[in-house]
Amino acid sequence: MIEEIIGQIFSIIAMALTVLSFQMKTKKQILVVQTAGSAFFLASYILFESWAAVCLNVVFLIRNTVFYFKDKKWASHGIWLYLILALVIAAGALGFNTYWDIVPIIGSIFGTVAAYMKRENMFRLLKLGDSPCWLIYNLSIPSIGGSVCEIVNIASILIGLIRYRKAGFLAEK
């Protein structure tokens, strides 16, 4: 019982960080705040014993770190996208327990491609494919913070897209 309460608290902290991330202006700022959110979600999913989500959040910590340093030579190669997508699928398979575990794997594919994007608004747009999948999964656990997070994330993403809109925001900088 106490583990579930602590897990819910961690998921609410993760929710606040993740929602806040979509209001950051630069991609690096978004990734830093999302990494902190992933760390709290990781802790909450451990307490919920949701192993697919645990494995996926470990990959998110790696993914966000690599993509944060995308401007460095070691992280700039396009192969990283494919390696991390492979890690997402492997992590989901490793933690697979029920058919519900397929849903966050699909969302994580969207989230990984989004995190790879150079443009912040393209990142936000692709995250709209990620959040509904995690919402469904979090409702199945149930994770209060995770479920509310994804509902609010969708709103935060849309607000971020509006706040930082530019004519032709999908075009290269």
Image (cartoon, helix red, strand yellow):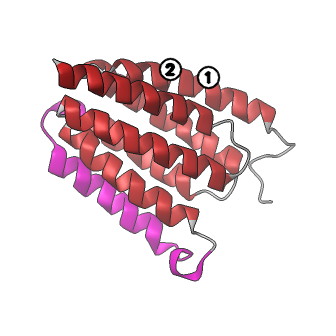
Up the image or down, 173 lies above or below 44; here it is below
**Which residue is label 2 attached to?**
151
- Magenta stretch prevailing secondary structure: helix
User: Which region is colored magenta?
Assistant: 72-101
Give the residue at x 52% y 72%: 78
Give the residue at x 46% y 52%: 112
Q: 160 or 31, which lies in front?
A: 31
Q: Secondary structure at mark 2?
A: helix
**Which residue is label 1 attached to?**
155
Which label is found at residue 105? none
Q: Identity of the amino acid at label 2? A: Ile
Up the image or down, 125 lies above or below 119; here it is above
Q: Is residue 102 left or right of residue 108?
A: left
Q: Is residue 169 left or right of residue 11?
A: right
Up the image or down, 118 lies above or below 145; here it is below
Quadrant the N terminus occupies: top left
Question: Is 171 one of the magenta-colored residues?
Answer: no
